Amino acid sequence: MKQPSPDTGQPPPPSTRENGNRANAMALEQQAHNLMLINRISTTLTSSLDAHEILHLTVQHLVEFSGIDYGSMLILEQDGQHVRIVAEHPTRQLGDLRLALPHLPSVQRALELGIPYTVEDATNHPLLDPVQKESPLLKFRSLLLVPLAARREMIGILLLASLDQPRAFSDEEMDICQMVASQAAVAVANARLLQDIQQQRHALTRKSQELTETSSKLDAILNNIADGLVVTDPTGRIILSNPAFREMAGLPPARSLHGRLLAESFPVAGLQPLAAQALKVPGQVFTDNLALPDGRVLKTSATALRIPPPILETERREKIAGVVNILRDITHEVEVDRMKTDFISAVSHELRSPLTAIMGFADLIQRDFRRWIVPHATSDEKTSQIADRILDNLAIIETQSQHLTQLINDVLDIAKIEAGRVEWLMDDTDLAEVIQSAVIATTALAKEKDLPIRVYLPADGLPPVWGHLDRLVQVMTNLLSNAIKFTEQGQIQISGCRLQVSRDGTIQPETLRAEPQNKALNLEPETLSPGEWVMVSVADTGIGIPAEEIPRIFEKFTQVGDTLTEKPEGTGLGLSICKEIIEHHRGRIWVESEPGKGSTFSFALPAALSQAEAPGRAGFAEPRGLNQT
């Protein structure tokens, strides 16, 4: 123990070294306290997954730590031009206050620099004047702004303020506030990320449920439709089938066909060529009637299975994943149609004999009446009127008999064609000769209506087609007669051209007529397979055909207009016969029309094969451009 000083009697003052040790101990104690505080705050922040709660706890802890009067959290909005107060302690009723950044230069500066920014005296401070003008409650003496940044993204700013007395913030306080703010920012970012993940998970769950429900509905529809459905990949292997198809194919209902070749599971002639055509021309539907060995008839439709490209794919090309085949059993319909045709054919045959007698006796009566009665009836006016009326009645009998004869001939023609009992005298046929014959046959009918018939053909002519001359003249005459019949004024145009169809489906007219009015080059109603074709069109300026009737115009007994309220303009079989004849020649026939502006009937036939391509040509050989549908 030190002795008292002999001069004063007091103990000596502590040494400088002792004072330094005490200061170091206090500093270490303060650092330990701060570390405990930071650890407590970190533990609190990491224990919460609610971003709003994290921000409130951060403000509360830092206000208590610094002994400051007020603290708040300002979160940057998505537009980057506004901040919103989302947490404060103690509350001053400023929660949810939205402030524009252009009016907050101090906040902008802190965000731009990314480091704490302090203002020891905020009275009349140029950076804080706009803040205090924005809200009278924002009156500060001293201010500390600490940015909140996480993963190199600024999310907001921490504001600590002294309200009445000036306050200086030490470097250690700013470091601790920055550390806590950084942890809070990371915690908020994690909470937001977790919230986004949860929302995405819920969205995926809902989408999965919707897809499951949709899949269940599609499976139920697939399993309950009456038509057979089988989907194959480009190699012909089955990837999907329904019970109706397995029943049509005679396969066990529970047997899986996945991965098996369709040709092996259902070996029916004509099914594979139909699928090949569908793959060759995506977007088109190819249809054919397939006869099974057991006598059943299936109407089969095939189209390519097209999958649209992904949204993010650069080239955006659709993918052809296979072929969708729909099969419908039309055995009963075919049998009923055959019975109907046989009945009509039998009745027509029975009507021919009495009809011939009626026409013969009507003609005989008319000649005898004119020869022996009319000369003696001219002396009396009343007798002359009766004689004229009798002649008119005989003319009506003759006209209606001719109409009935034409109806019977049409019925017998279509019955023979459908039954395959028509003798087809096939040979190289010049369509120019066909057109000329039809024009000669209808000239008188056109003159009655004063309708000119104009023909436009290429200067070098049209290539020959392999066909039956008389039957093609029948088609051309029918189309011309219809055009004249339904046209009161204007003109009739006949045009012909040569078409070259490439393998990608592009149609190139090699020879076109010069007349611009014709509009018969739209070949969308039918698909022409690759090869050389010859097209003929008959365009009129008549009444046109309503759009809803165009799909039925080539059906049997179909007529334009209301046959109940309007006088029928034909038998309703002419266009059906034309379709049968053209399709027998492996051609296509279609119509384009607009009510009040006329119609254009067109047909295309494959150009005739050369002798080298079809040796002998005894029968109808496979023409270039053949489409099997």
Image (cartoon, grey):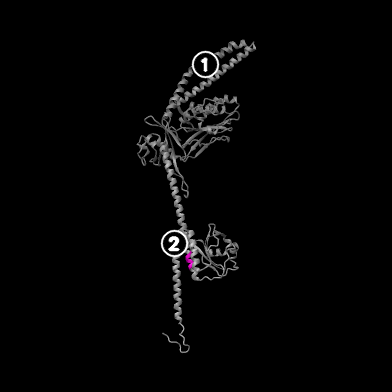
Front residue of 320/425: it is 320
Report the magenta stretch's main SS: helix
Tell me whether circle 1 and circle 2 mark residues in contact (CB < 8 Å).
no
Q: Nearer the viewer, mark 1 or mark 2?
A: 2
Q: Position of residue 587 (x, y in %)?
A: 47, 32
The quadrant in which the N terminus is found is bottom left
**Mark 1 → mark 2, Cα distance in angstroms:** 108 Å
* Residue wearing tag 2: 46
Q: Position of residue 535 (x, y in %)?
A: 51, 33
Q: Amino acid at mark 1?
A: Ile
Q: Is residue 179 magenta?
A: yes
Front residue of 444/257: it is 257
Q: Amino acid at mark 2?
A: Thr
Chain part drawn in magenta = 176-181
Residue 358's disc number: 1
Q: Position of residue 613 (x, y in %)?
A: 42, 34
Please give the name of the residue rendered at 50% of the width and 71% of the height, measured from the top-left corner.
Answer: 171
How many C-alpha atoms fall within 10 Å of the one at disc 2: few (<14), some, or many (≥20)?
some
Any part of residue 422 in sight: no
